[in-house]
Amino acid sequence: MDFFFEVLTGGLLAGVMYSLIAIGFVLIYKASGVFNFAQGAMVLFAALTFVSLVERGVPFWGAFALTLAAIVALALLIERAVLRPLVNRSPITLFMATLGLSYVIEGAAQALWGAQVHGLDLGIADEPLELGGMLLSQFDLFAAGTAALLVALLSFLFNRTRLGLSLRAVADDALGALAIGIRLPRIWAVVWAVAGFVGLVAGLLWGARLGVQFSLSLVVLKALPVLIIGGFTSMTGAIVGGLIVGAGEKLAEVYLGPLVGGGIENWFPYALALLFLLVRPAGLFGERAIERV
Amino acid sequence: MTEISSPLLRLEGISLSFKGVKAISDISFDVARGRITALIGPNGAGKSSLLNVINGVYRPQAGRIVFDGEVRQRMNPHRAAVRGIARTFQNIALFKGMSVLDNVLTGRNLKRRSSWLEQALRIGRAPAEDDAQRRRAEEVIAFLHLQPWRHTLVSKLPYGLQKRVELARALAAEPKLLLLDEPMAGMNAEEKREMSRFIADVNREFDTTVVLIEHDIGVVMNLSDHVVVLDYGRKIGDGPPDEVRRNPEVIAAYLGTRH
């Protein structure tokens, strides 16, 4: 039984790392109804910029601030050059635009900083820690704490300020939002900047674990089942979905893996997501489309 | 200071086309302060396009708009809202996932002065402002008799009530000019009477200037002080309801004539 809990806790903690990626998607999806394919590229861009600055002798917080400034500038540029000309287009058009954008950002990041693999040391040892009889990764605990802090910060920002209400208004009806004087371009810029900030945090944690390299932009694929299970429109959904995926894949590997010859950790989340699509297409916390007929 | 007798809104030679298709050609008229002006005309006459020009959604290729004594060349919906133009839409543009109260509160979006930081931490100007905004929203809700549905999700309300909530949201902004795009479309006679009364009340109580689009000629004649008739993007009638009713061109556009 102890072993079960150890696997479960380890899985839940790993799941938080997925949630971190998924939150970036949820922010942009809520504001514009678009699955932002470029989120992974933003994670890569942030991590690569940060690690390159650190390697050039910039201290940690200086590099963090500079990277944040770069990512905010990127968000403003995206709003101006991509989103504004495409205003009122269908979600599929915007999705295609983010697809193209992801290549541009990935290319730009590597053109700027090079394509070699960088190690990233955040100063947290990635070694097990004994807690209540369980061996837990110190790094995972740190990541979970960071994610909790981030979510608290975001919900503070979105639930209490006018920005939150404006965001919900824009998500519900862009035309109505314009009519009451909400500046759509500004909301988009803010949301992309915040999603970029989330990407930066995710990029640092994932970069520290996997090394900062091109494949970092592929962690978005891990966010997909999380979003399908939790729902595209809910921050809570992103957290819960991440936990389910994290715990699910570890438990499945340990308990189901031996039955089918192992190696199921990599595809199990997608199979789970498929199941959710059949039973609950909007996800656990997603908004179901309600239409009066 | 603007002169009281000057019109609140003056359109001068407005023309609008979409990729060569003329939606509005050379339309001019005045909207007097404190009056209700009706825009009528058959489907596709350019009425909604004209409202979209007035609140800055569309930019006309030619013409000039004078609003509240200020000439506007370029306009966008945000600036229109700041200058005191509020509107409703033909296909209700409410925030469906929010309660009636929240929808009305969003209408007061531009009246907030406190910063995000104050709002997030509930310090400084934010708490007093929250109370004030809520009080004003509740006043509008009471004025339009929406109290029973204050906390109901808008998407759960019947169509007629949604139309009224949209009016409430527009009214919450304390506009100088209220643009109503078919506020009574799809309503039965009883609902129309009720909505007409609300619009007349708004106009009288707050001295709000109203421009509305409506198809029900009976309603239009009773409610409005001034009627502008459009047909195929041209203005074919402009004057008090009784005069417009007798205008042969208007009769032709509405009823058809043998030539």
Image: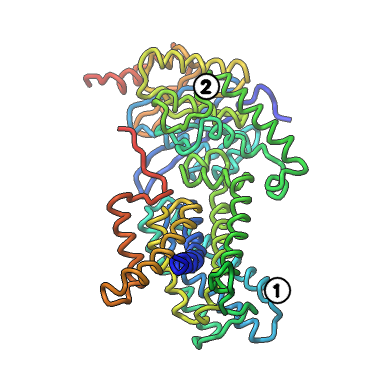
In terms of depth relative to the viewer, which is nearer, B179 or A153?
A: A153
From this viewpoint, is residue B216 visible?
yes
Q: Residue at x 58, y 82 (%)?
A: A120
Mark 2 or mark 1, whichever is nearer to me:
1
At label 2, the amino acid type is Leu
Q: Residue at x 30, y 32 (%)?
A: A293
- Give neighbour class at mark 2: few <14, some 14-19, many 20+ (Cα, 10 Å): some
- For the view shown, which residue lies furthest in the bottom direction? A116
Label 2 marks a residue whose chain is B
Q: How far apart are marks 2 and 1 (CA)?
A: 52 Å
The quarter of the picture where the N terminus of chain A appears is bottom left
x and y, in percent, of residue A152 in the image: 61, 55
The residue labelled by disc 1 is: A61
The part of the image, by quadrant, that contains residue A217 is: bottom left
In terms of depth relative to the viewer, which is nearer, A15 or B91?
A: A15
- For the view shown, which residue lies furthest in the right direction? B124
Q: Which residue is drawn at 73% across and 46% down?
A: B118
- For the view shown, which residue lies furthest in the left direction? B258
x and y, in percent, of residue A76 in the image: 57, 62
The type of colouring in the image is rainbow
The residue labelled by disc 2 is: B146
In terms of depth relative to the viewer, which is nearer, B34 or B31?
A: B34
At label 1, the amino acid type is Trp
Q: In this view, does A114 lie above or below B42?
A: below
x and y, in percent, of residue A126 in the image: 57, 79
x and y, in percent, of residue B162 in the image: 44, 28
Mark number displayed over residue B152: none
Q: What element carries label 2?
A: loop
Circles 2 and 1 on the same chain = no
Label 1 marks a residue whose chain is A
